[in-house]
Image (cartoon, rainbow, N blue to C red):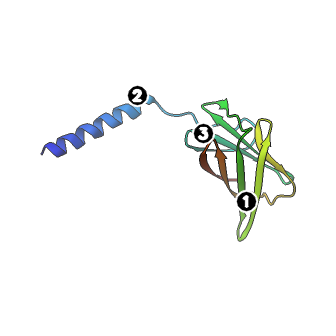
Amino acid sequence: MKLLAIITALALFSGTVAYAAGPHSHAEKPMHGGVVAEARDIDFELVAQKDKLRLYLRDHGKKVDVSNATATLTLLNGADKQAVALVPQGEWLGAAGEFKVNKGTKAVALVKQAGKTMTARFVLP
């Protein structure tokens, strides 16, 4: 009986804490015309064009310094798979070349920064 009371109290307390923190405004609007995804409280915005890829990172609306970051972006079009290394280019991680980006292309970004590895998934409009 005590165990049930403790579980109920924890559930109520957890719900209160989550509500008190309020809803997150992450991943709402792209700032660079791309597609936004959230992982580990970081907003990732992917701008994918046939000749260039850019990946922007924001933490609660503030730019994340990507000067020491690396990333691999995998583009998936049906059975076709294209892996692209993204390197720091000022405020974003990017690459230039020829990329298969179409409506419905799925993309997976694997970003390594400061000893952390983060994954963000996208579907291009």
Question: Which x, y percent locates residue 76?
Answer: 71, 63
Q: Quadrant of residue 103?
A: bottom right
Mark 1 / mark 2, whichever is N-terminal: 2
* Coordinates of residue 119 in the picture (x, y in percent): 61, 51
Residue at numbered disc 1:
75
Q: Point out the image quarter for the N terminus.
A: top left
Q: What amino acid is at disc 3? A: Ile
Residue positioned 76% across, 40% down in the render? 92
Is disc 1 placed on a helix, strand or loop?
Answer: strand
In the depicted view, which residue is nearer to us: 37 or 68? 68
Q: Name the outermost residue toward the bottom.
A: 79
Per the model, the C-alpha gap separating discs 1 and 2 is: 39 Å
Classify 23 as above or below 83: above
Amino acid type, callout 1: Leu
Looking at the picture, how far across and down is residue 86, in whole percent?
A: 76, 50
Q: Which mark is residue 20?
A: 2
The answer to whether the residues at label 1 and label 3 have Cβ atoms under 8 Å apart is no
- Residue type at tag 2: Ala
